[in-house]
């Protein structure tokens, strides 16, 4: 049943596709409802640059907006409850990017547990938080809440149809995007997959081929790259080192810094922050995952992804003749130790 302008209609179909997406997740923090906080949606509608921006969360959204607003002229502090930014990344990758942001003048408070948010008479936001150094309270002209995204499922009454969801409200699907109820599929962010536009596009292709074509496509065998659009960019595909270790895989880890020797293009651009890192399966020398922290990382990661899709060993990329001087030339140096 759907309701529009007070009129309730009952619609039926042989096939139902749920693609309601996600929205900024709002945490249950004491005092937050009384503060005019920003989200990734509303911060894009500001008419003026915040003079003092406090950012809750050091994930993709938090870091991208933190650096953006800092370069616009804001004084920015990022508060993160874990011991590193980008908690899913390998530690040295997160630390290298954090150092880049710190050098710019962005302040980062790690291991920060927020206890309370307050609103002051001049509409400033105050945050009380604890770190290993003790209790602190800071104020800012604006507060950005960047603590992930929540599925838009609360108004769908999914239990009425028997559709199963996770504890966080995401719709449970199999690798063909089928829910537990025949004839109902869920695609995009609401299905709990990678929250990227390109992943949602591929979800569409899976449905198109499986439901309306003669295909048997699945999410189980795809490599979904990610790119954090900070400066330098951070791109990744496949398994991180700690993910491969957690799976008990026999691996070899390769890593080189961005220098004029490893990536000659860096000398011509002057952008020499970052690193290249790859996780290799020992028995086959196939690339299990790759992380790039560098200028143009989002463009570079596609080269590694193509080799992974083709199932070629990393030695093929080591020996590939790559244009000079380009950023991808760095892969010759990264895999040189094989």
Image (cartoon, rainbow, N blue to C red):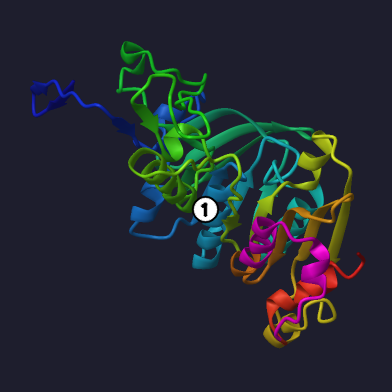
Is residue 307 highlighted in magenta? yes
Between 304 and 111, which is closer to the camera in this rendering? 304
The answer to whether residue 194 is above or below residue 289 is above
Left or right side of 141 for 311: right
Quadrant in which the N terminus is drawn: top left
Is residue 62 highlighted in magenta? no
Which range is magenta?
302-323
Between 3 and 142, which is closer to the camera in this rendering? 3
Quadrant of the rendered image containing residue 46: bottom left
Residue 17 location (% of width, % of height): 32, 33
Q: Name the residue that disc number 1 marks.
A: 52
The answer to whether residue 215 is above or below residue 51 is above
Residue density around tag 1, few if under 14, some if 14–19, many if 20 or more, within 10 Å: many
Residue 232 seen anywhere in this rendered image of the structure: no
Main secondary-structure element of the magenta-colored stretch = helix
Quadrant of the rendered image containing residue 160: top left
């Amino acid at each position: 049943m759907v309701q529009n302008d007070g009129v309730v209609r009952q619609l039926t179909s042989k096939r139902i596709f749920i693609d309601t997406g996600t929205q900024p997740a709002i945490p249950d923090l004491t005092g937050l409802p009384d503060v005019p906080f920003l989200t990734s949606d509303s911060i894009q509608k500001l008419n003026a640059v915040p003079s003092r921006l406090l950012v809750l969360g050091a994930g993709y959204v938090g870091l991208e907006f933190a650096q953006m607003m800092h370069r616009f002229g804001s004084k920015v502090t990022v508060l993160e409850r874990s011991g590193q930014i980008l908690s899913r990344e390998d530690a040295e990758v997160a630390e290298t990017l954090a150092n880049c942001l710190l050098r710019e003048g962005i302040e980062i408070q790690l291991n920060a547990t927020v206890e309370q948010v307050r609103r002051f008479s001049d509409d400033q936001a105050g945050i009380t938080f604890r770190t290993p150094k003790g209790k602190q309270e800071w104020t800012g002209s604006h507060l950005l809440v960047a603590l992930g995204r929540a599925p838009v499922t609360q108004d769908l009454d999914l239990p009425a149809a028997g559709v199963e969801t996770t504890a966080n409200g995401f719709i449970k699907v199999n690798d063909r995007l089928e829910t537990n109820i025949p004839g109902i599929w869920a695609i995009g962010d609401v299905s709990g997959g990678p929250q990227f536009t390109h992943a949602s596009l591929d979800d569409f292709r899976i449905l198109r081929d499986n439901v309306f074509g003669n295909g048997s496509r699945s999410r189980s065998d795809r490599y979904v790259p990610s790119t954090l659009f900070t400066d330098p960019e951070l791109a990744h595909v496949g398994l991180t080192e700690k993910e491969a270790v957690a799976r008990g895989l026999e691996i070899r880890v390769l890593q080189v810094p961005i220098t004029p020797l490893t990536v000659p293009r860096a000398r011509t651009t002057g952008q020499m922050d970052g690193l290249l890192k790859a996780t290799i399966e020992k028995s086959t020398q196939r690339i299990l995952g790759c992380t790039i922290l560098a200028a143009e990382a989002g463009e570079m990661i596609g080269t590694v992804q193509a080799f992974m899709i083709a199932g070629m060993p990393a030695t093929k990329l080591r020996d590939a003749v790559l244009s000079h001087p380009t950023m991808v030339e760095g892969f010759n140096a990264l895999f040189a130790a094989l």
